[in-house]
Image: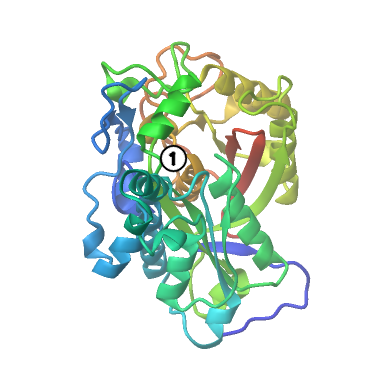
Amino acid sequence: MVVSNTHGPRKAVVTGWGAVTPLGCTADETWDALIAGRSGIDKVSCIDASDLPTDLAGEVRGFDPSAHLSHKQLRRMDPYAQYAYVAAGEALGRSGLALDGADTSRTGVLIGSGYGPMSSIIEQVTRINEKGPRAVSPFAPVTGAIDSAAGEISMAHGITGPTRAMSSACASGADAIGEAMRWIRHGLLDVVLAGGAEHILTRMDFAGSGNAKALSKRTGDPAAASRPFDADRDGFVMSAGSVVLVLESAEHAAARGAEPIAEVAGYESTSDAHHWTAPHPEGRGVRAAMRGAVADAGLHPGDIGYINAHGTSTVYNDQSELDAVRAEFGEHLDRIPMSSTKSMTGHLIGAAGALEAMASCLVLEHGIVPPTINCHDPIDPSVNFVPFEAQEHRVDAVLSNSFGFGGHNAALVLHRPR
């Protein structure tokens, strides 16, 4: 089914999603946990953390890859790619989209990841150092590639359009969705499977981020460790998982009788050009990203009904983001909710923006805003951080923020189908 449009830019709508997260192995399980205010953070079990700066993580628990993958696939696929593969399958199933015929060449895959297959890379480096070159897997060039998740999804579903990786640190998932929207908007493709995937729960990544003093050390109470916008926050919690959305042109969805769930209405990506880990002191790039995304959607700040904050629970990020949002939204911020779902999920790094985009779509669908748990002493009491419990709130437009090391900034505006 090839759908053309000669009347200008096309709308990109969301028709399905799938998720494998610390809150559940499906999108429904993840959303139910978010609305219940349930934390997915606990002591890490997949590595020995006894000598590491922290032992907290948002692991994917109860995930059985053998239920979805063949033995051959399991041998070559890093956990981050396994998560993306399963999330993409769920997303396609929920969308009701059958990929066949001309659809396959007008369909693409774009999976964001900050670090890619770190577990597999570390495993192969260990093998060659300990056992020599013959111990290295012949799958290593594939397994160790950051585009391996996109490639696996492409081959499984016969997708012959562009299949790529997107890497912009913690903005990767949001950037993947935004760029996929542009592919559709400008008529390059009709369908894109877009999202993010990450699994960096390795000793090396824990050591590096811990030595950078970015991770929470609240080891005595894991569920309370991630506390965005709380005065007592002390760092983020590393997590793993994947979320993939099915984006279609509105015309393509209508032609097959699919009901859009949301529209990816606006997107902007910027860079601070300031520092590898610290946000710009004036929030220059962050403000430009939010302003650009809202304008790209044809809206004004007063049209946004909810902000899904980046909200990592680090001292500098939370204050910097709040200052930037206040500067752009002014008094409107006092009238709308702004929450951080990372209080429950931890930080999925390259998958975070995709998870939060999915949550934003579900806010539009259900009229319920997920809470910021652990926000006992908010850094600005005038802001509705949706403390502890979800709130009913009918929303037409949502702003979802994603910012990363290196000064990467991405903002998405999700809207009810228009």
> Where is residue 31 shown, x and y percent of the image?
35, 46
122 or 56, which lies in front? 122
Q: Which colour scheme is used?
A: rainbow
Q: In this view, does 41 lie to the left or right of 392?
A: left
Q: Would you say residue 19 is visible in this rendering?
A: yes
> Dot 1, crowdedness within 10 Å: few (<14), some or many (≥20)?
many
Residue at left offset 44%, top offset 74%: 155
Three-letter amino acid code at disc 1? Leu
Mark 1 element type: loop
Residue at left offset 65%, top offset 38%: 408
> Where is residue 396 shown, x and y percent of the image?
57, 47
Quarter of the image where one finds residue 57: top left
**Is residue 183 depicted above or below 20 in this figure?**
below
Write down the residue under mark 1.
348
Quarter of the image where one finds residue 405: top right
158 or 394, which lies in front? 158
> Where is residue 306 shown, x and y percent of the image?
55, 37
95 or 241, which lies in front? 241
The number of callouts visible is 1
Placement of the C terminus among the 4 image quadrants: bottom right
> Where is residue 349 shown, x and y percent of the image?
48, 39
Quarter of the image where one finds residue 9: bottom right
**Is residue 47 depicted above or below 64 in this figure?**
above
Q: Would you say residue 346 is visible in this rendering?
A: no
Q: Residue furthest bottom?
A: 101
Placement of the N terminus among the 4 image quadrants: bottom right
